[in-house]
Image (cartoon, grey):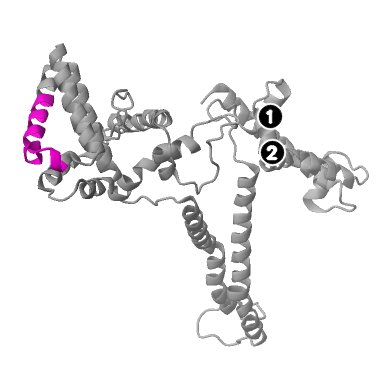
Amino acid sequence: MEFMVKLRYVLKFILAAMWVVLLSVTYAYTWEKPTGIIRTIKNWFGNGPDQPSLFIIAVVVYLLPDMLAAVLFALPLLRRKLEGSDYKLMRLIMWWSQTRLFVGRGMHESAFSLFMYTMFWVALLLTKFVFSYYVEIKPLVEPTKDIMKFPINHFRWHEFFPRAKGNIGVVISLWAPVILVYFMDTQIWYTIFSTLVGGVYGAFQRLGEIRTLGMLRSRFDSIPLAVNDCLVPVETSDPRRKKGLRSNFKNRFKEMTHEDKEKVAARFAQMWNEIVSSFREEDLIDNREKELLLVPYVADQGLRVTQWPPFLLASMVPIAVDMAKDSNGKDRDLKKRIENDYYFSCAIKECYASCKNIINDLVHGEPEKRVINIIFTEVEKCIAEDKVITDLNMQSLPDLYNKFVDLVLFLVKKE
């Protein structure tokens, strides 16, 4: 414990002892004809005239710190200003109530949050008092009066209250459980109120809405824009910023331009990867799980597609290859099946763009580059005209896929 903290506790103890003496003396001077200990205290300090105002002034001065604490509690903005002040008097006042903080200094709940918290306890205690009075206390008042009217004079057992006029033992046994419940049911009411209020608040805040991995996968594409809107500060003059909790993040992200998507995705990826890295540092996940969760925010500018973490795109490319091989219908049907799943479409686009970039980087000769460009141009033309199945041999697509996988594995080993 630091020296200043120890000094604060010692001074508080000394001041508390001084207040015990001062309040006792001033209270003794409020009596006109004191007796007993009050008279003794008054004789110690001089048997002067009665001074009730001294006791009132002492009580007001004693309550001043509590009044100041109540004002600061009700006005968090004022407390934030005082905590951030460097004036010696303000620092002394704040130090007396609490040692100087450096972490979290000046961070307090808003006035509305404090008001709602106060109303929560007001409603809780009001419900408790009303319930206790009408259900626990009031029904026992008349039976207690009736018991006290008819005393029992002869007892089979020992009477604990022989000089009592009524049957006080029966009354105590009747009221003892009620008194215990009265002082203990606050926790029960707190549990009920916190469950109801927390459930309603969580429903409006949509807490716990994503409960399974499937739900996370289906809504992951709405997280970057939600993080950008709720956590990243932006200029108030930005016309693209939409306020409100009900804005459709998912559709907005899909409708954004590629440049805007890159900015939003890069901001989210940096934060997401920090979270995943902290999970690995705390040994909550292993290296393989970390690689599956990381978002490649250092994206290849040549891909021109939004890159998602591998756990969302895993096993989708082999499924797409099998679908294209076994597809005997039209290109539109295959395209519709692919576009039904947003991540399915992203996985295919990223795989094609990556394949194109890798081959273009590996080929250096000009004739070879022209041949490669012609091949990719024809493929993209077939995709644009919906003639992939009719103009290309899809039966050889699995062999091409396996060769490309071997090439990637070879490059990874050489790297």
Q: Which residue is mark 2?
A: 72
Q: Which residues are magenta?
A: 389-409
Specify which label sits upstream in the sequence, 1 or 2. 2
x then y, percent, for residue 134: 62, 75
Is residue 398 rendered magenta in the image? yes
Measured from the top left, where is residue 292 in percent x and y?
24, 34
Side of 169 where 31 appears, left or right: right
Q: Which residue occupies the foreground of this view, 60 or 151?
A: 60
Q: Quadrant of residue 297?
A: top left
Q: Main SS type for the magenta part?
A: helix
Indicate the secondary structure of the residue bearing disc 2: helix
Give the labeled residue for mark 1.
82
Q: Amino acid at mark 1?
A: Leu
Q: Is the residue marked by circle 1 packed among few (<14), some (14-19), or many (20+) residues within 10 Å?
A: some
Label 1 vs label 2: CA separation? 9 Å
User: Residue visible at 42% across and 39% down?
Assistant: 255
Tell which of 62 and 13 is nearer to you: 62
| 181 in magenta | no
The residue under the point 54% across, 45% down is 244
- Furthest residue toward top: 365
Residue 364 in view, yes or no: no
